[in-house]
């Protein structure tokens, strides 16, 4: 059986946006036309590719496997064209998208990849900052090739490897007076502080929360004495305006590198995997 390109294009457009209407706009066709192509594809395979429910759609397990195939197919085509057009330079070339949450994107991903990207200037790299749940969603919908999370995605179609650990500690300003009953988080949905205190052998203190958007906003707030915070210890390196509050046990979370399991990886993808796996651990913690 051969898969029709028009049907695969329709599937990919919908899978990446999780929307039939957005997928149709991407391909400049009607929503009924894209629905018809996907219905024919599902009939040919004898499998449902999407769960359809009032709140929207999401990929079935078969859909996730097909998305991985589509990404491999695109990678093969892109690598062929790159090889044909860059034979003279001898440099790696390609386009790669990586998403991560705030405490590892700037302090782990960028320094891990910087030497490699400086040597291979024909690689276009896009780094996307999102929260953990959004990072996983970008990968599962095929909008990025790599995602770094502090949780296991747990999908058969996705490879997940632990590349290190974040050691969470309580921090406060070393230069300003700080109210020890105020803790700073990213947002009301951020459970870092709550999870940290649940891991402690002693009862959690009573505390008030304030929110400063991302880990670097939190660090700025701590420096100014707005409150304490629970943050990864690796963010404190070289910062003498912040100190670790004694009396708490470190709380370790795994950092996962996630990417689609597929039969073919381009040379650029292979190097991205190797660079992150080899260099990222030096920026992260190790449990005692």
Image (cartoon, helix red, strand yellow):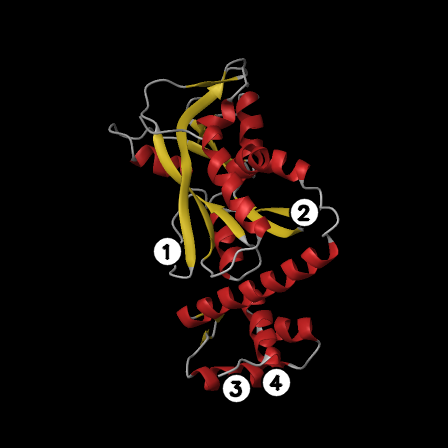
Mark on residue 4?
none
Measure how far apart labels 4 and 3 are at the Cα level. Answer: 12 Å
Occupied quadrant, residue 80? bottom right
Is the C-beta separation of discs 4 and 3 under 8 Å?
no
Which mark's residue is nearer the viewer, 2 or 3? Answer: 2
- Residue identified by numbered label 4: 32
Residue 118 in the image, given as x and y percentages of width and height: 67, 36
Question: Which residue is pictured at 69% across the width and 46% down the height?
Answer: 90
Measure how far apart labels 2 and 3 are at the Cα level. Answer: 37 Å
Compared with residue 199, is residue 271 higher up or lower down, i.e. above or below?
A: below
- Residue identified by numbered label 1: 154
Residue 42 in the image, given as x and y percentages of width and height: 47, 82
Compared with residue 181, is residue 117 higher up or lower down, i.e. above or below?
A: below
| 2 or 3: tag closer to the N-terminus | 3
Residue 262 in the image, given as x and y percentages of width and height: 47, 60
Occupied quadrant, residue 33? bottom right
- Residue identified by numbered label 2: 123
Measure how far apart labels 1 and 2 are at the Cα level. Answer: 30 Å
Measure how far apart labels 2 and 4 are at the Cα level. Answer: 38 Å
Measure how far apart labels 1 and 4 are at the Cα level. Answer: 33 Å
Dot 3: what SS? helix
| 1 or 3: tag closer to the N-terminus | 3
At label 3, counting other C-alpha atoms closer than 10 Å, the crowd grade (few under 14, some 14-19, many 20 or more) is some
Mark on residue 40?
3
Which mark's residue is nearer the viewer, 2 or 4? Answer: 2
Q: Nearer the viewer, residue 55 or 259?
A: 259
């Amino acid at each position: 059986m051969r898969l029709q390109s028009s049907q695969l294009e329709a599937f990919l457009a919908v899978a990446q946006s999780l929307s039939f209407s957005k997928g149709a706009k991407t391909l400049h066709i009607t929503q009924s036309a894209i629905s018809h192509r996907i219905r024919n594809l599902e009939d040919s395979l004898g499998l449902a590719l999407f769960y359809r429910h009032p709140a929207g759609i999401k990929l079935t397990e078969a859909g996730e496997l097909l998305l991985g195939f589509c990404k491999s197919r695109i990678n093969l085509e892109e690598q062929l064209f790159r090889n044909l057009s860059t034979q003279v330079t001898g440099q790696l070339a390609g386009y790669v998208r990586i998403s991560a949450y705030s405490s590892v994107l700037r302090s782990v991903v960028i320094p891990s990849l910087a030497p490699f990207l400086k040597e291979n200037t024909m690689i276009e790299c896009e780094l996307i900052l999102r929260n953990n749940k959004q990072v996983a969603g970008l990968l599962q919908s095929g909008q990025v090739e790599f995602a770094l999370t502090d949780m296991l995605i747990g999908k058969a179609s996705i490879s997940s490897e632990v590349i290190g650990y974040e050691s969470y500690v309580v921090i406060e300003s070393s230069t300003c007076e700080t109210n020890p009953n105020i803790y700073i988080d990213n947002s009301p949905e951020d459970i870092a502080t709550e999870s940290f205190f649940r891991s402690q052998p002693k009862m959690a203190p009573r505390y008030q929360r304030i929110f400063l958007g991302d880990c670097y906003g939190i660090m700025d707030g701590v420096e100014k004495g707005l409150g304490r915070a629970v943050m990864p210890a690796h963010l404190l390196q070289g910062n003498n305006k912040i100190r670790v509050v004694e009396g708490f046990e470190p709380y370790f979370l795994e950092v996962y590198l996630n990417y689609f399991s597929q039969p073919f990886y381009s040379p650029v993808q292979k190097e991205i995997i190797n660079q992150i796996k080899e260099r990222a651990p030096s920026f992260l913690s190790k449990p005692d």
